Image (cartoon, rainbow, N blue to C red):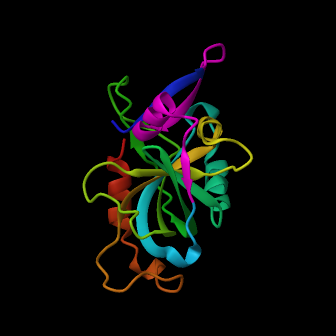
Amino acid sequence: MQYAKIIVDDAQKKGALLDAAEIYMLNTAPSSIIEHHHDKTQCVSKLVYGRYMPQADLEFPRSEVKRHIHNAIGQTLAHIRHDTAVYLGIEAIELIDVTLTLNCGHCPTPHKTNDMPFAALIACPAQFELNKRGFAKTAFVRWHEMDIPTNILNRMGLFAFICEERRYHSPPTIDNWVSRIDYRRATQRAQKLS
């Protein structure tokens, strides 16, 4: 399992949803993160599929989750890799309005979530590669007025980028990316993530 909820406030039983790489970073080197900014001219556009996962204990209504997602367009997102924060951005996003389920391990059957599958056009470093099979890459809106560990523990949710659409030979653009979305594949890959 790539994602886990950790308790950050025992008195209120408040938890934070974290990815395994983020948990590792918080336990080993939370104050020595290298922030890797990229010049926009060095970024490439990619069409990716994923799942937005709101913080579980905050219980946002679905309309609020959608607003959080749309507010991330044009914002700086951070992805934690070892001791480095790699920055990227969402240029455009298409939500797939279906209900996803989650097998939490505690319940005998999967239960409904407020998680949202999506297709997104992202601007990222060329070396930001998504695994064909394996872990998603987690990104979150970077609030620069706080340090990264505090940002991670207080974010509204996270973007799990699962896979890249690679069936086209030319790069996606703001004009053609929507026509390249495979909605069925995007939904299936988002449902498999846990």
Instruction: Determine the residue located farthest toward the left in the rendered image.
Output: 133
The residue lying toward the viewer, choosing from 24 and 192, is: 24
Give the image quarter of residue 167: bottom left
At 40% across and 37% down in the image, what residue appears?
Answer: 20
Q: Where is residue 103? Give x, y as percent.
A: 36, 34
At 54% across and 82% down in the image, what residue appears?
Answer: 174
At 56% across and 32% down in the image, what residue appears?
Answer: 16
Instruction: Determine the residue located farthest toward the top in the rendered image.
Output: 11
Q: Where is residue 90? Give x, y as percent.
A: 56, 66
**50 magenta-colored:** no
At 32% across and 64% down in the image, what residue appears?
Answer: 185
Disc tally is 0
Q: Where is residue 66? Give x, y as percent.
A: 62, 55
Q: Which residues are magenta?
A: 9-36
Relative placement, left or right, of 90 versus 101 is: right
Is 2 above or below relative to 63? Answer: above
Is 145 above or below relative to 50? Answer: above
Is 53 above or below relative to 122? Answer: above
Is 130 above or below relative to 82? Answer: below
Check the picture and name the quadrant holding the C terminus: top left
Relative placement, left or right, of 44 versus 35 is: left
Give the image quarter of residue 105: top left
Q: Where is residue 147? Give x, y as percent.
A: 66, 41
Check the picture and name the quadrant holding the N terminus: top left
Give the image quarter of residue 70: bottom right
